[in-house]
Amino acid sequence: MTTNESKLKPGQVPTVEVLNWKENLIEEKGKTFNLDISQIFMEKATFEKLAKNNENRIRVYLGLELIDKKYSVCAFAVSTYKADDGTGAYNDNIKPVFKLAPTNRDYSDKIEMVIESLTLWNSWRDGELLVDESALVRKYIYPKGCLLQKEGLDELFNVTGNDTIKIEFGIRKTFELMETGTKGAMKDGNGDDEQVFNDMGPCPPFCSQGGIYP
């Protein structure tokens, strides 16, 4: 770990990694990403209404909207609550729901519009909208939404003093380990591919504490 990395706060991303994520997204614009991206911001007032003074987290859902006859990525935010079933999951509160634009708008009375926007994104993500040769890969790269920790938002709004924060996107690339059988053609049940497994815990963070191996 470098000196600069050791000074990072929880959830903070090193600058060099931020630049790499952004470059990766630019590369994907010629491959799997054929959309525009709208301006997405979160205001402090929206944060306060959704996160409140408890352990609630904020979930941001991705959607699509038509701008100048072209689909553009937009985002909506809802509050969540921790499920009491012991799973550690966070479930959504249906209302309020805010559209995260340069000026945040409460869309609680426009739920159907929100669902339509999210459905369009999911259709694109599933390879059913704006179909091209890479459409079926999208769902492995692009999420439906993200559950945000409060710590980073609290740092930006309450410690640094921002009234508005910008939400941007990037793509993380990781080196993956895959396990495949060598005894004949091991099929996965679909009848056209080998069985391939990926159940690794990468190091870091899943590293041995001590020992002789570097």
Image (cartoon, rainbow, N blue to C red):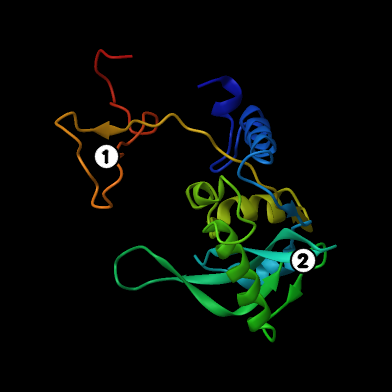
In the drawing, what numbered circle is on residue 128? Answer: none
The residue beneath circle 2 is 66
Q: Position of residue 33 (x, y in %)?
A: 65, 46
Q: Amino acid at mark 1?
A: Glu
Q: Amino acid at mark 2?
A: Leu
- Seen at 38% across and 71% down, the residue is 83
The furthest residue to the left: 183
**Side (left or right) of 213 relative to 109:** left
**Side (left or right) of 24 relative to 100:** left
The residue beneath circle 1 is 194
Instruction: Classify mark 1: residues with Cα within 10 Å, few (<14), some (14-19) or many (20+).
Output: some
Q: Position of residue 143 (x, y in %)?
A: 53, 54
Badge 2 marks a residue whose secondary structure is: strand
**Side (left or right) of 54 relative to 166:** left
The furthest residue to the bottom: 109
Query: In the rendered structure, which disc, 2 or 1, sits on the residue that comes first in sequence?
Result: 2
The answer to whether residue 146 of the structure is visible from this angle is no
The furthest residue to the right: 68
Q: Which of label 2 and label 1 is nearer to you?
A: 1
